[in-house]
Amino acid sequence: MALDRPDMLNSLGFPKPPSETRVVVAMSGGVDSSVVAAMLAEEGYDVVGVTLQLYDHGAALAKKGACCAGRDIHDARRVAEAMGFPHYVLDYENTFREAVIDEFADSYLAGATPVPCIRCNERVKFKDLLETAKDLDADCMATGHYIQRKMGARGAELHSAADAARDQSYFLFSTTQEQLDYLRFPLGHLASKAETRALAAKYGLSVADKPDSQDICFVPNGNYAAVIEKLRPGAAEPGEIVDMDGTVLGEHRGVIHYTIGQRRGLGIGGLADPLYVVKLDPDTRRVVVGPKDALSTRTVPLREINWLGDAPFTSREVWEMEVKIRSTRPPRPAVIRPLSETTAEVELFTAEEGVSPGQACVFYAPDGSRIFGGGWIWKG
């Protein structure tokens, strides 16, 4: 496809023909990134597919429901062969362990509830892989994430996906402005996953009917505790379950088996009112339980803030926005008070239950789809 005028932009936003535009596509082997690669190849772009080997895929070959396993590498390679573009597998196993898995284990041991998928995007895919794309002289890097990149008055902006059910903005809040300038998300405007699968069928991709990944890629069957025990032998030491006054109610088999807000599986039945995990104290190996209202809070301390606003974060005393404190919850109105460029206190208009250190708090425009970044919840 030739561009009629030099000031015309191709579909990725560059003033040149697709054939002269190199794009690295991060391919997980799933249907989303495969469709992105096939779509861009069909449009005539100079596509280079890259798949990351993030952990020992020999042990993962028989594992379903996770990304970046051996089967997924094979599937990505087949798509590249079918569409006629080069495909490379990069061994990032050591980087992934140091940047993501080790912190995941240590966070759980410290009583937090980490979100490793955010760290993977932040520290591996959008950092090391993005630098690799630049080393390959690519004009940009594209992924299969469901989120939108739109051009605003001051440059590239991050916006929620058109399909709220598929939106991945919670997991991408730490994308920096520099990264956003280089990234492209070709699926963010689609109305449903059915459209993506229809495109996969149109391109004749072998992954058209492949199930979506469900688990964290290195946590088989969602069994976090088993992974942490393997990574940190001795982590599952037993301790006491106590109420908020310190009265011992029972014993537990390791703090790593519990999360804030948990009700089931406490092993302390026979009480008149249900109790919930309200605090994890790894230093004393105590699980603290209390009534449901003890889980409610309106104040959320944040650190490691990534800000994507047009004006500096500290240019105002308060920002009125909506925030999301868990990936499964809708954004809620709040006031954000900057304490520094990277720390803040969030005051929720309505108290939320189960706010947990280690989770993210993501900032959204109160009257639109734009994402203004976010930060990590900590104990304060």
Image (spheres, rainbow, N blue to C red):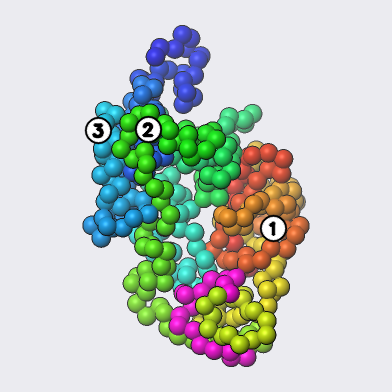
Residue in the image at 26% along x and 51% along y: 70
Q: In the rendering, at what x and y percent does residue 35 appear?
A: 39, 34
Q: Are there few (<14), some (14-19), or many (20+) residues within 10 Å of tag 3?
A: few
- In percent of width and height, residue 133 lies at 36, 37
Q: Which residue is mark 1?
A: 346
- Estimate the spatial distance between the alpha carbons at disc 3 and disc 1, rounded to whole Å: 49 Å
Give left or right: position of 275 versus 74: right
Q: Residue at x 36, y 51 (%)?
A: 67
Q: Position of residue 341 (x, y in %)?
A: 62, 52
Q: Which residue is mark 3?
A: 81
Question: Quick one: label 3 or label 2, which is nearer the N terminus?
Answer: 3
Q: Earlier in the sequence, mark 1 or mark 2?
A: 2
Q: In 3D space, how far apart are the residues under numbered discs 3 and 2 (Cα atoms)?
A: 16 Å
- The amino acid type found where label 3 is placed reads Glu
* Residue 268 occupies quadrant: bottom right
Where is residue 180? Give x, y as percent: 51, 38
Q: Looking at the image, which is closer to me, 247 or 140?
A: 247
Q: Residues within 10 Å of mark 2 (few under 14, many from 20)?
A: some
* Picture quarter with the C terminus: bottom right
Q: Is residue 221 visible?
A: yes
Q: Nearer the viewer, mark 3 or mark 1?
A: 3
Q: Quadrant of the N terminus?
A: top left
Whether 230 is drawn above or below 284: the answer is above
At a point 48% along the width and 68% down the height, the residue shown is: 107
Q: Which mark is residue 201?
A: 2
Instruction: Kindly identify the residue that appears in the image at 48 percent across and 53 percent down.
Output: 118
